[in-house]
Image: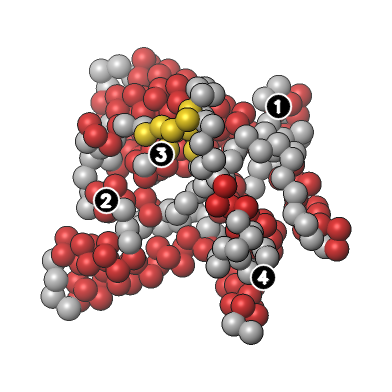
Amino acid sequence: MLAFAKDITQKEPNHPEEGQNAKLKEYMGYQRRINHEKLIYHSLEHAKSYLQKTINDMRGDENKLKKYLEQAFPVSHRYANSDTVMLMLRKLMNAHNASNNWYRLNRFYFGLTYDAMNRFVQIYNRLISEAPEKSAEYGISDQTAIDFDDWVRLYFHDLDFLIGQPLPYVHFTFRQRNRAVENFIQKEIDAGKSRKEAIDEASKEFNIEEDAVSILLGKTVDQKDLELFYTSAENPIYEFLYDTASEEGFQDGECLLDHSYFLAHQLKGLSEKEAESVVSEIEKLSKH
């Protein structure tokens, strides 16, 4: 099973404040309707099937294939060609279908997963309104449209693979980090450093992992980057999310998971300006 920032196998997430907060209860009801395992599976399967079809249809026409790759995989085409993307999709699907282990993704794989899910969610949401009987066959969300911005906020660790690139959604909390990194790099370049030197400094300042640095430098996937590291499914890799002593919670006794859902319900559907106002208020309260 693929390991994201949260456990995608959790079927009935809840929040202790639902009974006192109607908006939060509605949001958690939305979360309970999503089958994350199936959402990921169908996203990867769709991406793999259509890439294979395109490779077959456009065999010999590298220009057309390249254009398709740029359109269908706007993130991952920057560091992987069609053959590599296909190999990565197969590895992701094999790992996702393996129930005995958790498989951790590096940012090359997260970028590809982002591409696959973004494209599939748009198609799936359109089916819900235009052909609900077809969307129901996927068994993903009980005819409820998926909010991709919200999904990424909950289940991705960061969007460091998109540093320096325009973000197609609000992605507010990740946008703040990416913008700070981009501004730092630009200041270093303006001060006379080379782009590589500036990126190296940024990686130290913001703890950017090596894989994200490689993407930012425009490097392609290396053989070592194709590895998916695994650990037994019996290992409690999400235990820290339930730690009520975590300093990352908003209130005393609040675990990181509850804090994450609470923040997400406040940001869901907001514009960048609206989200900025909400986060600003939260930061003010957290200081008191």
Identity, as a three-letter code, of the amino acid under mark 3: Leu
Q: Amino acid at mark 4?
A: Asp
Mark nearer the N terminus (1 vs 2)? 1
Q: Is residue 13 above or below residue 128?
A: below
Mark 4–mark 3 Cα distance, whole angstroms, equals: 32 Å
Q: Earlier in the sequence, mark 4 or mark 1?
A: 1
Q: Measuring from the top left, give residue 167's x and y in whole percent.
A: 45, 56
Label 2 environment density (alpha carbons within 10 Å; few <14, some 14–19, many ≥20)? few
Tell me the quadrant of the picture where the C terminus can be found.
bottom right
Please identify the quarter of the rendering in which residue 126 is found.
top right
Residue 171 or 235: which is nearer the viewer?
Answer: 235
- Image depth: mark 1 or mark 2 in front: 2
**Discs 4, 3 touching: Cβ within 8 Å:** no
Q: Secondary structure at mark 2?
A: helix
Mark drawn on residue 252: 4
Few, some or many C-alpha atoms within 10 Å of disc 3 (few <14, some 14-19, many ≥20)?
many
Report how far apart the C-alphas of labels 3 and 2 lie in the structure. Answer: 13 Å
- Closest to the camera, between mark 4 and mark 3, is 4
Q: How far from the left and from the top, in percent, is residue 199?
A: 23, 62
Residue assigned mark 3: 105
Q: Secondary structure at mark 1?
A: loop
Give the residue at mark 2. 210
Q: Which residue is mark 1?
A: 139
Disc 2 or 4, which lies upstream in sequence? Answer: 2
Left or right: 1 with respect to 137? left
Q: Earlier in the sequence, mark 4 or mark 3?
A: 3
* 231 vs 94, nearest the viewer: 231
Comparing labels 4 and 1, the label whose residue is closer to the camera? 4
Q: Secondary structure at mark 4?
A: loop
